[in-house]
Image: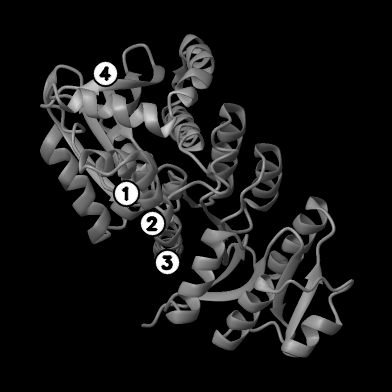
C-alpha cells in the first residue's frame, strides 16, 4: 500500500534554503508534500492550501532574487502569480504565530526543515514553540550549541514524541548523529573517544595546500566549492564553526546519556577559542601545515569528546595539532568532515567521512526529512527516542542496520 505523503514547510531562504527549494523543484519527493516556504519577512503558500508545484517554486525563487520591495504583499507579488498568497511577517512572534496557524489543523502530520541562520535565542524560541506539532529537521546549529537550550529542546522532543533530524548541525554526510547515538548505546561504563575534523572548508584548504596550491588559490578553491560559512571571507569563521559543532555534539551526547559536561573543559575551550581563530590566517596556517607534512605529520584542527561511562562525565576540547601519520584522521579529507569513534585501550577506531557545503546540506536535509516521513508511522508506542536512527534500527530499516553493523564490526 502506498504511504501517505507528509506535509512539509521550509524555514529560511538563504543559500541552503534556496538549494532545498531548487532540489524539490527539480525532483519532487515521493513522501514529501511541500505546503509553504517562509523566511523572516514572508510566508508563501498557495491560496487553495494545496501543494506548491514547480511553477510556484520557480516564482518563489524569482521573488527571493527580486530587488523590488513592495510595501505590502499585494501588487508586485500578485502580478507574478495569482495562485500564490504571501503573508508578511513583522516579527519573530508573528512568524511563530503564523506557523502555528499553518499546522494546527493536522497535528503530528508535519515536518519542518529549518535552514535559518539566526541567534541561539531566536532559534530556540522558534523550535521550542513548534515541537510537538511536527517533526523537526535542522541545519541551524546555534540553539543546539547552547547546553541549556539543547537539553530543553531534546527533553521537549522526547516528551512530545518529536523526531529530530540533527545531522546537518554537525557535518552533513559524515552522519555523526547516526553513528554517535549508536556508539552511546553500547558505551555502558567504558571510556569512549570521539575525535572530529568536521569543518569541510578547513579540510579542503589543507588538502589543496598539500597539493601545492598557494594559500590564496587554496582559499579560492574553498570559495568556488561553496564551502565557506555565510558571510565568511577567510578561515576564522570556519574555526569557530568547528568549535560550534563540537559544542553541539557534546551537548547532544549529554542529552542522550544524562552525563555532565565538565565545567573545566567548557571554560578551557572558551579561553582557547580566540587564539584558535587567530591561527586561521591563510598564510600562517598553510606554512604550519606544510612544515608538519615535511616531517611525516599531518597538522590539522582536531576536536575531541571524551565520554567517561564510569563517572558519567563528558570532557571536550579543540586544538591545532600535528597528527601522527598512523592516525586514521591524518590524511586529506577534500571538502569532507570526518569523525572517529573508539573505546580507550581497546581495538581499532571506526572512521567515517562525508561531504559538506550548502548544496549537499540541502540534499541531506531532504534525505533526513524523507526518512522521518517513512518512520513517522513506525515509531514504537513505548520507549520513544527522538533521534531517527534509533527508531530506524528498531524498525529494521536497512540503512540504519547497516550503519549499526559497520560500527559494531570495528569497535565492539
At x 49%, y 33%, the residue is: 236
Task: Identify the image quadrant of the N terminus.
Answer: bottom left
Q: Residue pushed farthest top?
A: 264
Q: How many angstroms separate mark 2 from mark 3 (CA)?
A: 26 Å
Q: Earlier in the sequence, mark 4 or mark 2?
A: 4
Nearest the viewer among 115 and 187 is 115
Q: Which residue is mark 4?
A: 191
Q: Residue at label 1?
A: 335
Judge whether residue 169 can be spotted in this image: yes
Spatial separation of the CA atoms under disc 2 and disc 1: 8 Å
Q: Which mark is residue 352?
A: none
SS for callout 1: loop
Q: Nearer the viewer, mark 1 or mark 3?
A: 1
Q: Position of residue 300 (x, y in %)?
A: 29, 29
Residue 50 locus on image (x, y percent):
64, 84
Query: Any mark on residue 225, and which?
Result: 2
Task: Verify CB contact (< 8 Å) between mark 2 and mark 1.
Answer: yes
Classify residue 64 by image quadrant. Answer: bottom right
Answer with mark 3 or mark 4, whichever residue precedes in sequence: 4
Q: Residues within 10 Å of mark 4 (few under 14, many from 20)?
A: many
Secondary structure category for the residue under label 2? loop
- Circle 3 sits on which residue? 370
Q: Mark 1 or 3 closer to N-term?
A: 1
- Residue 168 higher or lower than 345, as above or below: below
Quadrant the C terminus occupies:
top left
Dot placed on the residue nearer the N-terminal end, 4 or 1 = 4
Q: Is residue 5 visible?
A: no
| Mark 4 or 1, closer to the camera | 1
> Helix, strand, or loop for circle 3?
helix
Residue 143: x %, y % from top left: 60, 38
In the rendered image, residue 75, in percent from the top left (x then y), is placed at 85, 84
Amino acid at each position: 500500500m502506498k504511504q501517505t505523503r507528509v506535509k512539509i514547510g521550509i524555514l529560511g531562504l538563504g543559500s541552503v534554503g534556496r538549494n532545498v527549494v531548487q532540489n524539490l523543484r527539480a525532483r519532487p519527493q515521493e513522501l514529501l508534500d511541500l505546503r509553504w516556504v517562509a523566511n523572516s519577512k514572508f510566508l508563501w503558500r498557495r491560496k487553495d492550501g494545496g501543494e506548491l508545484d514547480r511553477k510556484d517554486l520557480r516564482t518563489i525563487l524569482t521573488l527571493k532574487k527580486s530587488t523590488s520591495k513592495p510595501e505590502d504583499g499585494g501588487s508586485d507579488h500578485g502580478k507574478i502569480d495569482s495562485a500564490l498568497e504571501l503573508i508578511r511577517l513583522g516579527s519573530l512572534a508573528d512568524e511563530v504565530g503564523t506557523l502555528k496557524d499553518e499546522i494546527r489543523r493536522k497535528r503530528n502530520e508535519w515536518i519542518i526543515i529549518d535552514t535559518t541562520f539566526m541567534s541561539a535565542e531566536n532559534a530556540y524560541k522558534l523550535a521550542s514553540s513548534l515541537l510537538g506539532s511536527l517533526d523537526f529537521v535542522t541545519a541551524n546549529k546555534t540553539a543546539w550549541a547552547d547546553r541549556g537550550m539543547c537539553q530543553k529542546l531534546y527533553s521537549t522532543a522526547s516528551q512530545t514524541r518529536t523526531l529530530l533530524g540533527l545531522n546537518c548541525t554537525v557535518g552533513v554526510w559524515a552522519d555523526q548523529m547516526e553513528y554517535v547515538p549508536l556508539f552511546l548505546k553500547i558505551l555502558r561504563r567504558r571510556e569512549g573517544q570521539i575525535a572530529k575534523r568536521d569543518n569541510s572548508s578547513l579540510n579542503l584548504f589543507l588538502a589543496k595546500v598539500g597539493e601545492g596550491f598557494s594559500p590564496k588559490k587554496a582559499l579560492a578553491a574553498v570559495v568556488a566549492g561553496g564551502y565557506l560559512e555565510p558571510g565568511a571571507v577567510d578561515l576564522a569563521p570556519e574555526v569557530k564553526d568547528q568549535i560550534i559543532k563540537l559544542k553541539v555534539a557534546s551537548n547532544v551526547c549529554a542529552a542522550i546519556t544524562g552525563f555532565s559536561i565538565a565545567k573545566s573543559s567548557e571554560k578551557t575551550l572558551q579561553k582557547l577559542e580566540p587564539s584558535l581563530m587567530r591561527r586561521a590566517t591563510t598564510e600562517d596556517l598553510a606554512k604550519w601545515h606544510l612544515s608538519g607534512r615535511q616531517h611525516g605529520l599531518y597538522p590539522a584542527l582536531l576536536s575531541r569528546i571524551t565520554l567517561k561511562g564510569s563517572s558519567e562525565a563528558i570532557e571536550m576540547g579543540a586544538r591545532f595539532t600535528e597528527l601522527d601519520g598512523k592516525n586514521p584522521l591524518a590524511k586529506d579529507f577534500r571538502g569532507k568532515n570526518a569523525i572517529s569513534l573508539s573505546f580507550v585501550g581497546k581495538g581499532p577506531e571506526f572512521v567515517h567521512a562525508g561531504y559538506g557545503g550548502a548544496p549537499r546540506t540541502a540534499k541531506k536535509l531532504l534525505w533526513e526529512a524523507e526518512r522521518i516521513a517513512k518512520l513517522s508511522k513506525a515509531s514504537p508506542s513505548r520507549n520513544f527516542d527522538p533521534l531517527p536512527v534509533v527508531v530506524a534500527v528498531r524498525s529494521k530499516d536497512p540503512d540504519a542496520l547497516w550503519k549499526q553493523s559497520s560500527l559494531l564490526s570495528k569497535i565492539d
